[in-house]
Image (tube, helix red, strand yellow):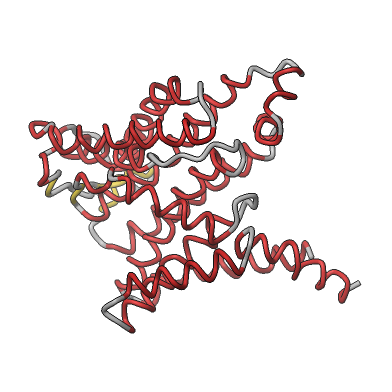
Amino acid sequence: MRALRWTFCLAAAILLLCIPLTGERFYMYLTIQVLILALFAMGFNLLFGYTGLLSFGHAGFYAAGAYATGLLLMRTPLSLLPSILGGALVAGGLGVVIGFFCVRHTRIYFAMLTLAFGMMVYALAFDWKSVTGGDDGLIGIPRGSLWIPGMGAVKMNALWTYYYLVLAITAAGVGMIHRVVHSPFGLVLQGIRENENRAAFAGVPVRRYRLAAFALSSFISGLAGAMVAPLENTVAPTAAHWTKSAAPVLATLLGGIHTFAGPMVGAFLFYVIQEFIERMTEFWLLGFGLVLLVLVLGFRGGVVGYYEAHIRPALCRRLG
């Protein structure tokens, strides 16, 4: 089964690397959107699936990363990559401040607090017109250039060059999350998720671990948002609205909460289903909701969770 998994990963990597060779801007743009949502959902799932805390306000960190990156590119001489990392750090710092108040509570109180803070970020983006552009948002964000040692500044105007940058950053982000969740820190987070009282009795500083998970989750979400600003050349307050927070929740539920690859698979399904139904009918929201309902109810634990629980054991028995 390990060989099958590596074969699938290698095939997916080759496919992702070859998409720009088609020359189709639509496929490149759609894949970038899938990669960004996948990273956003994985950052969200670090808090939800691994720590047991459901956030309804992660769009606030996504927007913080996007706005900070846009401002750095428009008002400073920083190049593209430092601006993206700077946007993610701003989101991570915001996560430390908001998380300090949120991790003192759990369950519905935690969810409501994150929703309230997320809408505060939305209101700030909407009303602070001198910095954020108000309801118009930031317009005309340059994509800038990428400094590569030995090659100098590489312009990112062409979509395919930016595609490979997004792919590289997403791969690095996924690798970092994989390292975190399989480290002793990640195991402690899962222990807190299963029984926080037992973890506290064992001497684990539960709030500190939750705050660290919250900050890291905010950083990853901000990194996803930071890649949107140079792609779209604009950022609007809707990026921080609570409806934006629903996207990583749905992607995670579709793919699988307690699986590492679940949010990535869910992000792919999210965009593929949406694109397919949009082409079929003008009432795409109704159709999209029905399909999501069937998938969530029919595949308890998500598509990857269903595979791990039912298909994989059957394959193991058949293959010996």
Residue lying at 38% horizontally and 39% vertically, measured from the top left: 57
Against 117, residue 282 (above or below) is below
Q: Nearer the viewer, residue 7 or 130?
A: 130
Q: Quadrant of residue 297?
A: bottom right
- The image shows residue 172 at horizontal and vertical percentages of 51, 46
- The image shows residue 236 at horizontal and vertical percentages of 19, 47
Residue lying at 40% horizontally and 58% vertically, measured from the top left: 164
* Residue 261 located left or right of residue 281: right
Q: Quadrant of residue 149?
A: top left
Residue at the outermost front position: 108
Against 188, residue 268 (above or below) is below
- The image shows residue 49 at horizontal and vertical percentages of 59, 44
The quadrant the C terminus occupies is bottom right
The quadrant the N terminus occupies is bottom right
Q: Nearer the viewer, residue 121 or 131?
A: 121
- The image shows residue 257 at horizontal and vertical percentages of 60, 51
* Residue 313 located left or right of residue 188: right
